[in-house]
Image (cartoon, rainbow, N blue to C red):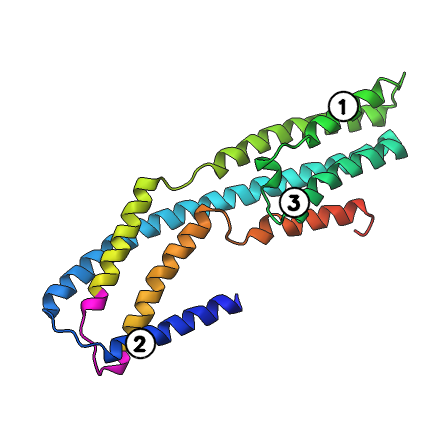
Amino acid sequence: MKRVVTIIFLLVLFLSVFYFSYTKQSGVEFDRVFVTLATFLFSIFTGFFISNQNSRYGKIRDAMSQLDGKLSGIYRASMHFGHDMHTRVGEIIKQNYEAIIASNTWDYNFTHKSSTITDLHSNLEQYFSTVEKPSEIQKQALARVTSALMDLQSLRKTVIALREERIPLFQWVLVVLFAATLLVTVFSLPSQGFLIGSILKGAFAVSIVSVIFILRSFDDLEFFEGRIGAHSAKDLIDIINGEK
């Protein structure tokens, strides 16, 4: 974050100096009309897309929280199946999250083949095939685990569908076109020798680029990436290791 703030500050400083010394004669009223139109169109499009992508991010975050909660519940319930089974379930879940931490990507198990759900299913089937008469609490725990596994399948499909809801190329072209138009029109406004005007133009130009960067980060689901995946993964591994 400090690095981004430093880059933004340097860009504003550079553009302010450039605008302060740049000589340009133009029709001010004509340029102001284009600035107004470009600002309106750019703000409408980017505002809608950022709002939509922010909603998408929130839905994925909620789905991932539910998914992590289901896996945590499965681990807790498996303690009723004996120590060995409890340990095996913990190892399967740890492998799922260790892959996330190692790759530093929250969606690793959605972009790569994952056998977490099938391994849990097969271990449960293998365990209960050797149990002649499960106790009442084991039956209840099995029902909870089976229900959670079904929910995991549904949540996985939900996350995959939301992950694919990206901004289409045509809409990206429009956003970039409006941003370029706005940058050009701002650039054309005279500000030579006017310090405050030069600083405002520099800050405005950098803010336009920053909005595009934020929109791209939301579209790629890289905004607050660590909060979606790494923290939750570390928390569940700590639970399995007995640290929480």
Q: Nearer the viewer, residue 97 or 14?
A: 14
> Could you tell me if the residues under marks 2 and 3 are in contact, i.e. CB atoms within 8 Å?
no
Q: Nearer the viewer, residue 243 or 190?
A: 190
Three-letter amino acid code at the position of disc 3: Ile
Q: Residues within 10 Å of mark 2 (few under 14, many from 20)?
A: many
Three-letter amino acid code at the position of disc 2: Ser
In this image, 152 relative to 56: left or right? right
Please tell me in which quadrant of the rendered image residue 207 appears: bottom left
Residue appearing at x 38%, y 42% in the figure:
167
Sequence-first disc among 1 and 3 = 3
* Residue designated by label 3: 100
* Residue designated by label 1: 122
The magenta stretch spans residue 138: no
Residue 143, position as x, y percentages in the image? 74, 25
Sequence-first disc among 2 and 3 = 2
Residue 234, position as x, y percentages in the image? 70, 50
Residue appearing at x 34%, y 41% in the figure:
169
Can residue 199 be seen here? The reply is no
Residue 46, position as x, y percentages in the image? 33, 51
Give the Cα distance between marks 1 and 2.
64 Å
Residue 159, position as x, y percentages in the image? 54, 36
Sequence-first disc among 1 and 2 = 2
In the image, which residues are magenta? Answer: 186-197
